[in-house]
Amino acid sequence: MALLELENLSVSYGAIQAVRSINLEVETGEIVTLIGANGAGKSTTLRAISRLLKVREGRIRFDGRDITTSSPDAVVRSGIAQSPEGRQVLALQTVQDNLELGAYVRHDRAAIREDLARMYTLFPRLEERKHQSAGTLSGGEQQMLAIARALMSRPRLLLLDEPSLGLAPLIVLEIFSIIRNLNAEGTTILLVEQNAKLAMQHSHRTYVLEAGQITFSGPSQELLSDERVLHAYLGG
Amino acid sequence: MDAVQFLQNLLNGISIGSVYAIFALGYTLVFSILGIINFAHGAVFTLGAYLTYSLAVGQFGIGGILADLQIPFQLSFPLSLLIGAILSGVAGVVVERCAFRPLRFRGADPLLALVSSLGVALVTVNVIQYLVGSEIYSFPSDVYGDIRPAFVLHFGEKLVVIRTVQIIIFAVSIVVLALLGYLISWTRIGKALRAVAENASTASLLGINVDRFILYTFFLSGFLGGMAGSLVGTSFGIAGPYFGVAYGLKGLAVIVMGGLGSIPGAVLGGMVIGLAEAFVPADYSAYKEAVAFAFLFVVLLVRPQGLLGRSQIQKV
């Protein structure tokens, strides 16, 4: 049984149907990438999984449990954390407070302190700035903070929405190597990216979303050499 | 005005200003979370005053359908004040459930919630009038127990009189402010509350139950409003069910002056309005409100965002 299963999922924004009857699975231990053009419904899918958007039709199952009608906070407690698009750090609170709020659903204080130390090892720049308000960080630092904050809940599934958006190429590579390491340590990841090639190179499987529907899916290595995908998304 | 008169006005202003501050914070908290002014706040202020009065005096009222109805117990003033404020907090929660939540869940324009809160305010005030009448209520002078009514400082021929009740309302307000400041700045709940205020959808991605925090906020807001009403009531009496309306408007002046959504702004604004009123000479005391609002007008001309507001609205 897959860790996450989307079954015939449809999501609407008002009258517009942003996602139409998609089926998607993420197995434990995988990195799965969801690629597609702007407005294809990638972020919509992630926001629906986090229950920020109403599901129109279909089911979302996590670890065999139906979470289609759960509240957003219940989804986090069940083990899904999201690093949202545009980073969305709490600009008025300090870096450390942001991280501690990431562990809001946990009550094991000692382990939270350990994880905080681990985040600072993983992202040394966040430690240097831990008492600064998050709004003063650079874009790359805010992205690191958003990822670290999501990790603080010790999620079994991490949803990453456009982690490379607006970042310098070197920082993007750094972030992707961190994503690989997290996965190697056991975190399952569902990744949404504009930078399709890079995301596919760093993931096990890929789904291609087009106008709200999944048009291709398969192992990333295979899709990377697929003529049609190459042509449409990889500028080849 | 000589130095002694100045000192007297200053003390009067600080005392009432501290109550304005906690009252205005009730508006600020709700505004920070929802971006809406809760017009029922003045009604909760009134309700708190009547509740504390009933608990401390042991009867509901001297008019209305509850006239002469006795409560089988009579509580000490501190306990009455606390329970009155807690019940007001519960009233705040009821206001949220009736006036705000149904509209929010339907995705209605926030402006509609403002109107519905005004409706709740009117209903509350009318129900209070129906229950306890519109007479003026004064707390009995021995409500604080056996303590001296005032302290007199002698400056040669001149006197500065500090009523004990002024000290009490100042002390209570400061304690409430300190506790609230601690709660919001240093506790896990406070940090989560600020997260909800800054961005509700991000807060929910962190596992924070936003609706529950909205309820907490209305409880705190009602608690502060009811406590402020009780303190003003003990100091000046309860001038009838509508007495919260004037204070409600004054509270709005306070938060606009301080900067919408700013907690330090609400405290500073409360002090400024309290002092501005205190320095209105006794002969012109009927114009107190006019002076306070004129002051607000001048401040807004110079700083449209309020004294401590940011040009972009800062929340909590």
Image (spheres, coloured by chain):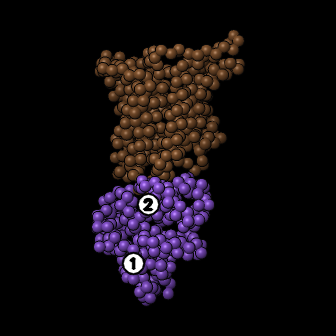
Chain colours: A purple, B brown
Residue B143 % position (x, y): 44, 18
**Secondary structure under badge 2?**
loop
Q: Label 1: chain? A: A
Q: In front of the other: label 2 or label 1?
A: 2
What type is the residue that disc 1 sits on?
Tyr
Residue A153's disc is 2
Residue behind mark 1: A207
Residue A191 % position (x, y): 44, 72
Residue B48 % position (x, y): 41, 29
Does any portion of residue B300 appear in the rendered image?
A: yes
- x 52%, y 72%: residue: A178
**Secondary structure under badge 1?**
strand
- x 29%, y 64%: residue: A65
Query: Distance between the Cα atoms at labels 2 and 1?
Result: 26 Å
Q: Which of B77 and B211 is in front in this view?
A: B77
Q: Label 2: chain? A: A
What type is the residue that disc 2 sits on?
Ser
Residue B13 % position (x, y): 59, 26
